[in-house]
Image (cartoon, rainbow, N blue to C red):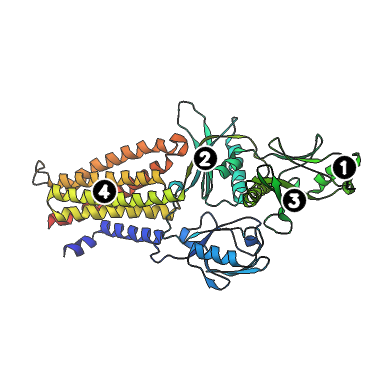
């Protein structure tokens, strides 16, 4: 009878509806298995076959899932790696997903697909919980907000083109005594510290010179096409022993614009022709490749290109290592970086790294386990203390249910609005739940207080308690607002989840708790 009476309370019904919406948003997958396509490299074999790049707004459980490779079922990441590595080179590779069937031409290059285990929920994990790199960048000169927006757009393009997934780039400020500080906060899951540092710290200004004359620069203005992820016009051309190890040479083709080709013709028309000991005819000056002012390579120019408007150019460079495998891997990394810069162009202004953090996926997984463990221990401890304090199971159980409800609602909110949950966010959830327990104690003590006149009804006592609760909510809300921008945006997660948590509590869970307690006390 008590339960049916409680369930008829509109405040309890509101809580139940909110919980159902939260569970739908979280979308728990109890039998999750298989692998998902987390990201796809631009201009890769995968994109050429029709596999689309996942949107940043895609819910984790809605990513395209790989079901089979060449007709063989894929249940784990190791299954996918084994099946794709065993497939013959220069032959079609059939990938079956939950959306379509694709045929990819397997070459010596990467397929361009980044995979991950099937997520168990729609909760997006922040950097600390899944591993990756966080970089706080600051412009070396004062810039306007529009210039900062342009820089973020170019950085996103550069990092996406490089093939990095789960990229989060945003503007950040600092509420310090030194007003006017502007930052860019970059968070990338699954990327190494070195990779990110090279891509975001260097301006990436590419220049190809013949003597002192610039023939072409990186970016779409001078370069209309860059070959990548193709075994015919890009790849490792040769490897040979060098001092202390091996050197591998990469090479890839680019297509120049008509303006850059005309500039090349004009610069080369007056150059002399030299003949090597082997009888090869080449021009007296080389094509020198510079990246951020540093000479990367010098290429001989064939005499046949003297004064001619050529649009087809081959770019090459070295990779060094202690053995052939290491040198080849380094060469591919250098080629990928250079291709990315040639496609996206240089950054409009220089950035300096203020802070850089790197967290391993293993450590992130351990953070998740510890967070769940501490949460369970804390909730159980609070329930036991409430039972000891009031010696009444009927009052301890609603407190326990309310705590679970608040956590579910906050996780549902994060899933619904695609908010990344990081360690700061978890701290905010803990703070909000702790505030909720305080409010529930205030209500119970007010209702049970012997100092209040006996004639005062339970409803009136709850109203008095809510006056205290609303005042505390207003103070907490106001105190969190500055933290949304303080610390260059690193405390945003804590402030945001705390505000959401205490607001959800005051307007949904506390009224429902009051309705439950009111019914139990009346009975």
* Of the image marks 3 and 4, the number of the one nearer the N terminus: 3
Q: Residues within 10 Å of mark 3 (few under 14, many from 20)?
A: some
Labels 3, 4: front one: 4
Tell me the CA gap for discs 2 and 3. Answer: 31 Å
**Label pair 2/3, CB-CB below 8 angstroms:** no
Tell me the CA gap for discs 3 and 4. Answer: 59 Å
Side of 147 relative to 29 (left or right) = right
- Where disc 4 sits, the SS reads helix
Q: Residues within 10 Å of mark 2 (few under 14, many from 20)?
A: many
Q: Nearer the viewer, residue 31 or 5?
A: 31
Q: Residue at 62% of width from left, 60% of height from top?
A: 111
* Of the image marks 2 and 4, the number of the one nearer the N terminus: 2
What residue is disc 1 on?
283
Residue 348 lies in what quarter of the image?
top right
Tell me the CA gap for discs 2 and 4. Answer: 33 Å
Spot occupied by residue 118 in the image (x, y as percentages of width and height) = 46, 62
Q: Is residue 107 above or below residue 488?
A: below
Query: Label for residue 135?
Result: 2
Query: Label for residue 378?
Result: 4
Tell me the CA gap for discs 2 and 1. Answer: 45 Å
* Of the image marks 2 and 1, the number of the one nearer the N terminus: 2
Query: Label for residue 224?
Result: 3
Residue 449 appears in the figure: yes
């Amino acid at each position: 009878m008590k339960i049916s009476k409680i369930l008829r309370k509109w405040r309890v019904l509101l809580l139940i509806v909110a919980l159902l919406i939260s569970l739908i948003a979280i979308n728990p997958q109890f039998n999750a298995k298989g692998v998902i396509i987390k990201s796809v490299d631009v201009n890769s074999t995968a994109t050429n076959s029709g596999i689309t790049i996942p949107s940043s707004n895609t819910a984790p459980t809605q990513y395209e899932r790989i079901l089979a490779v060449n007709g063989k079922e894929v249940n784990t990441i190791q299954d996918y790696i084994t099946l794709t590595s065993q497939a013959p080179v220069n032959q079609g590779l059939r990938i079956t997903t939950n959306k379509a069937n694709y045929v990819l031409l397997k070459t010596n290059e990467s397929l361009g697909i980044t995979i991950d285990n099937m997520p168990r929920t729609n909760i997006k994990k922040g950097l600390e919980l899944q591993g990756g790199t966080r970089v706080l960048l600051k412009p070396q000169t004062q810039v306007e907000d529009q210039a900062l927006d342009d820089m973020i757009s170019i950085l996103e393009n550069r990092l996406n083109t490089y093939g990095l997934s789960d990229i989060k780039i945003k503007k950040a400020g600092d509420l310090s005594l030194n007003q006017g500080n502007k930052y860019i906060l970059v968070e990338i899951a699954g990327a190494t510290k070195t990779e990110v540092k090279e891509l975001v710290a260097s301006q990436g200004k590419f220049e190809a010179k013949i003597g002192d004359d610039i023939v072409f620069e990186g970016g779409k203005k001078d370069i209309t096409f860059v070959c990548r992820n193709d075994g015919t016009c890009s790849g490792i051309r040769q490897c040979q022993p060098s001092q202390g190890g091996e050197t591998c040479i990469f090479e890839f083709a680019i297509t120049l614009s008509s303006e850059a080709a005309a500039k090349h013709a004009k610069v080369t028309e007056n150059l002399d022709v030299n003949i090597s000991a082997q009888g090869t005819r080449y021009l007296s000056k080389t094509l020198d490749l510079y990246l951020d002012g540093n000479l990367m390579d010098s290429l001989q120019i064939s005499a046949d290109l003297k004064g001619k408007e050529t649009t087809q150019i081959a770019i090459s460079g070295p990779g060094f290592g202690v053995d052939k495998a290491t040198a080849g891997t380094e060469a591919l990394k250098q080629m990928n970086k250079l291709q990315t810069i040639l496609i996206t162009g240089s950054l409009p202004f220089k950035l300096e790294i203020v802070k850089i953090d790197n967290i391993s996926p293993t450590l992130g997984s351990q953070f998740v386990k510890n967070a769940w463990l501490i949460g369970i221990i804390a909730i159980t401890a609070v329930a036991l203390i409430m039972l000891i304090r009031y010696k009444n199971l009927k009052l301890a159980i609603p407190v326990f249910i309310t705590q679970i409800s608040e956590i579910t609602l906050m996780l549902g909110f994060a899933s619904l609005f695609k908010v990344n949950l990081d360690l700061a966010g978890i701290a905010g959830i803990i703070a909000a739940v702790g505030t909720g327990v305080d409010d529930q104690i205030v209500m119970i003590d007010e209702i049970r207080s012997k100092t209040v006149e006996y004639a005062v009804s339970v409803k009136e006592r709850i109203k008095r308690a809510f006056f205290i609760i609303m005042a505390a909510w207003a103070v907490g809300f106001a105190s969190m607002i500055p933290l949304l921008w303080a610390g260059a945006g690193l405390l945003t997660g804590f402030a945001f989840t705390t505000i959401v948590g205490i607001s959800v509590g005051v307007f949904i869970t506390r009224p429902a708790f009051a309705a439950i307690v009111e019914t139990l006390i009346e009975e």
